[in-house]
């Protein structure tokens, strides 16, 4: 941040609220049928946003059943990010998240970070879909979670993977919801789709654009089927069309990346000659290694090692490993019992790693340019100044967040025990690794049974938190008086929120999948096996292993009543402008599903992005540029030529790199 920006941030944080900012929303919203209630955004918001100025948060009240508008209500949580433009376009973009089972409004900065390229001209709206996170606080199964989360965490810690929900856990949650009188059959995509135009009306928008990712694409397609007024355009990114039995087709999310990324080799005469039938040979290699692993100088190479290289080129967190150029040679070598290339990949030698920092890269470039000693002294001075600027930037960010938190606490008159508990919960929620969140959650829950002690709180913090977070929380814990420590332990007994997101996320996913997608045998393990065998990509050993992907759903969905809907699995149609974006390496929603998603859309364009995974805008500026151009002019000619530059070359046996066609 520049000094001027820092001055502006301090002034904005400490200034009296502008009574005219978001005045209509503060007065209850633009549509009396769907009242708006504002609430503080989930912290931290600063320094990138300022609550009440650049972003505002709250809930929109609407019917639990849109066909019974006078019946029970549900609150849909939202974040509204104002455009950077002083004269924004009147049609914002609403983001529909994936899952369902992972919300977005609690991640204020991360959420809008994906859409900054659209915010220059438009407001951005993000919601937690019904039944998910902040749009379902009354659906928390606290009694069941309190009784059973501990064993689930122990299982995770023992086996090293986030556990699936056990049957008695699900049964307990459903019974708890029944006892509350909640009709969870109304947590479905049809009602969810009716929420979206209601939210936009409440926020005062007559026209809007939709950006759906993953399950959000399924929700977008249902909205397009219902065809409410106001939709200007829609982008569906990482497509999951409901007219495909997707839970019986997840195997295709692992075969399509092989076919799509290696298909470029088969289309190129040089590559096809050197690596003939490389797609079929890659699938065959899995079968070979399943029966006969290869012994190499660095250990055994089995089917799991190859799966990790090919299937994990991208992951759910948006991480990317550019190993595609080496796969044909790797496959060829392994067929011959040679582990040279895969050993280099597994050791991190391939692909070549960039400099570990921008400073190192700049220094290396300067040295390579042959600068004199005096010239290099200037370079080092510049790099030193840049390093100090980076430290200062981080200091400003931490200080701004601390100031924001302190001002919030002052405004609410929050006592120190609640401040500590809130910040501990926020720190747990902010941990990026689900396994680590569950581990700290297990110890957090165990404190319910201990005598109140600041030392126990500090031990929890120092065991699980990074040094910076631990220092801040430990300092706060040491300020607690005995009565405040006792109050913290009471809050721990009352509030399990920070420890249950992963478990409840699974339950929220099952609420949708089991009631909709597993109705009338639309999805099943039998169909999974039959479709995979019919496709013929995977051999029998891999088919047997991959079919286990659907097993958790088979178990869980037996506990739910099914609620099939008319036309749910029939192919939808729309005449709205739609852009279908798909990543070739997507292992959650197969890239080939994008074309099937828009097969009956009269005004649709489709883009398949090389070397991209789930949610293409996370992987390249090219994808961002294409989506921005489409939103700006949905009916214009879309220039997608930048995707041609994303196709990586292939390594030939002599070590040279050969370019491949898009």
Image (cartoon, rainbow, N blue to C red):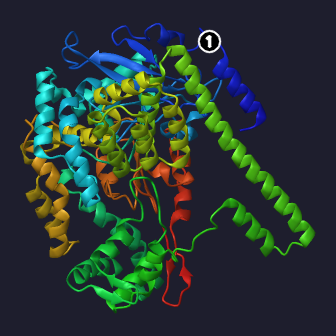
Horizontal and vertical percent for residue 133? 33, 32
Horizontal and vertical percent for residue 418? 43, 23
Mark 1 secondary-structure assignment = loop
Query: Would residue 582 appear left or right of 137 to someone viewing this image?
Result: right
Residue 478, placed above or below residue 348: above
Horizontal and vertical percent for residue 105? 42, 31
Residue 564, placed above or below residue 626: above
Residue 659, placed above or below residue 469: below
Residue farthest bottom in this picture = 336
Quadrant showing the N terminus: top right
Query: Would residue 290 appear left or right of 488 to someone viewing this image?
Result: left
> Which residue is more in the foreground, 516 or 598?
516
| x 14%, y 28%: residue | 176
Q: How crowded is the residue under tag 1: few (<14 C-alpha within 10 Å), some, or many (20+)?
A: few
| x 22%, y 53%: residue | 155
> Which residue is more in the foreground, 20 or 157?
157
| Residue 262 visible in the current orientation | yes
| Residue 578 visible in the current orientation | no
Residue 462, placed above or below residue 267: above
Q: Quadrant for residue 207, please give it.
A: top left
| x 43%, y 25%: residue | 482
> Which residue is more in the foreground, 279 or 406?
406
The residue tagged 1 is: 18
Horizontal and vertical percent for residue 388? 76, 49
| x 68%, y 60%: residue | 358
Q: How many marks?
A: 1
């Amino acid at each position: 941040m520049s000094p001027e920006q820092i001055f502006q941030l301090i002034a904005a944080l400490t200034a009296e609220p502008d009574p005219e900012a978001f005045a209509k929303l503060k007065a209850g919203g633009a549509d009396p049928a769907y009242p708006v209630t504002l609430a503080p955004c989930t912290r931290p918001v600063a320094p990138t946003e300022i609550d009440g100025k650049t972003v505002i948060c709250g809930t929109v009240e609407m019917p639990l059943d849109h066909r019974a508008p006078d019946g029970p209500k549900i609150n849909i949580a939202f974040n509204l990010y104002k455009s950077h433009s002083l004269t924004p376009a009147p049609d914002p973009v609403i983001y529909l998240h994936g899952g369902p089972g992972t919300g977005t409004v609690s991640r204020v900065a991360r959420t809008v970070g994906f859409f900054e390229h659209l915010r220059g001209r438009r407001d951005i709206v993000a919601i937690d879909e019904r039944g998910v996170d902040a749009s379902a606080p009354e659906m928390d199964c606290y009694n069941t979670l309190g009784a059973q989360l501990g064993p689930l965490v122990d299982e995770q810690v023992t086996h090293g993977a986030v556990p699936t929900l056990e049957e008695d856990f699900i049964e307990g949650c459903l019974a708890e919801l029944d006892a509350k009188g909640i009709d969870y059959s109304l947590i479905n995509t049809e009602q969810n789709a009716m929420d979206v135009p209601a939210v936009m009306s409440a926020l005062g928008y007559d026209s809007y654009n939709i950006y759906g990712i993953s399950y959000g694409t399924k929700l977008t397609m249902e909205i397009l089927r219902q065809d409410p007024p106001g939709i200007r355009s829609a982008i569906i990114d990482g497509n999951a069309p409901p007219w495909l039995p997707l839970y019986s087709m997840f195997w295709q999310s692992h075969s399509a990346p092989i076919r799509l990324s290696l298909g470029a080799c088969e289309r190129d005469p040089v590559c096809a000659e050197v690596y003939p039938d490389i797609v079929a040979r890659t699938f065959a290699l899995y079968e070979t290694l399943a029966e006969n692993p290869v012994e190499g100088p660095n250990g055994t190479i089995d089917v799991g090692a190859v799966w990790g290289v090919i299937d994990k080129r991208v992951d759910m967190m948006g991480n990317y490993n550019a190993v595609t150029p080496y796969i044909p040679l790797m496959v060829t070598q392994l067929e011959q019992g040679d582990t040279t290339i895969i050993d280099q990949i597994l050791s991190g030698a391939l692909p070549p790693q960039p400099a570990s920092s921008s400073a190192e890269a700049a220094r290396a470039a300067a040295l390579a340019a042959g600068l004199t000693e005096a010239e290099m002294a200037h370079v080092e001075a510049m790099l030193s100044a840049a390093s100090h600027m980076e430290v200062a930037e981080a200091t400003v960010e931490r200080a701004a967040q601390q100031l924001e938190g302190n001002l919030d606490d002052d405004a609410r008159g929050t006592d120190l025990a609640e401040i500590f508990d809130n910040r501990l919960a926020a720190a747990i929620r902010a941990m990026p690794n689900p396994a680590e969140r569950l581990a700290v959650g297990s110890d957090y829950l165990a404190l319910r049974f201990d005598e109140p002690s600041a030392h126990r709180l500090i031990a929890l913090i120092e065991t699980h938190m990074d040094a910076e977070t631990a220092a801040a929380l430990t300092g706060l814990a040491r300020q607690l008086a005995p009565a405040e420590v006792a109050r913290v332990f009471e809050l721990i007994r009352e509030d399990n929120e920070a420890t249950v997101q992963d478990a409840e996320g699974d339950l929220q996913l099952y609420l949708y999948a089991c009631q909709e997608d597993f109705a009338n045998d639309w999805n099943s393990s039998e169909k999974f096996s039959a479709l995979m065998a019919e496709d013929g990509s995977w051999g029998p050993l891999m088919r047997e292993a991959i079919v286990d992907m659907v097993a958790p759903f088979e178990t869980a969905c037996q506990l739910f009543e099914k609620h099939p809907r008319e036309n749910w699995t029939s192919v939808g149609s729309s005449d709205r402008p739609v852009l279908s974006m798909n990543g070739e390496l997507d292992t959650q929603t197969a890239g080939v599903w994008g074309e099937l998603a828009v097969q009956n859309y009269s005004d649709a364009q489709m883009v398949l992005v090389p070397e991209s995974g789930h949610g293409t805008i996370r992987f390249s500026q090219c994808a961002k540029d294409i989506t921005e151009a489409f939103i700006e002019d949905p009916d214009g000619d879309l220039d997608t030529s930048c995707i041609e530059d994303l196709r990586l070359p292939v390594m030939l046996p002599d070590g040279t790199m050969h370019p491949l066609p898009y």
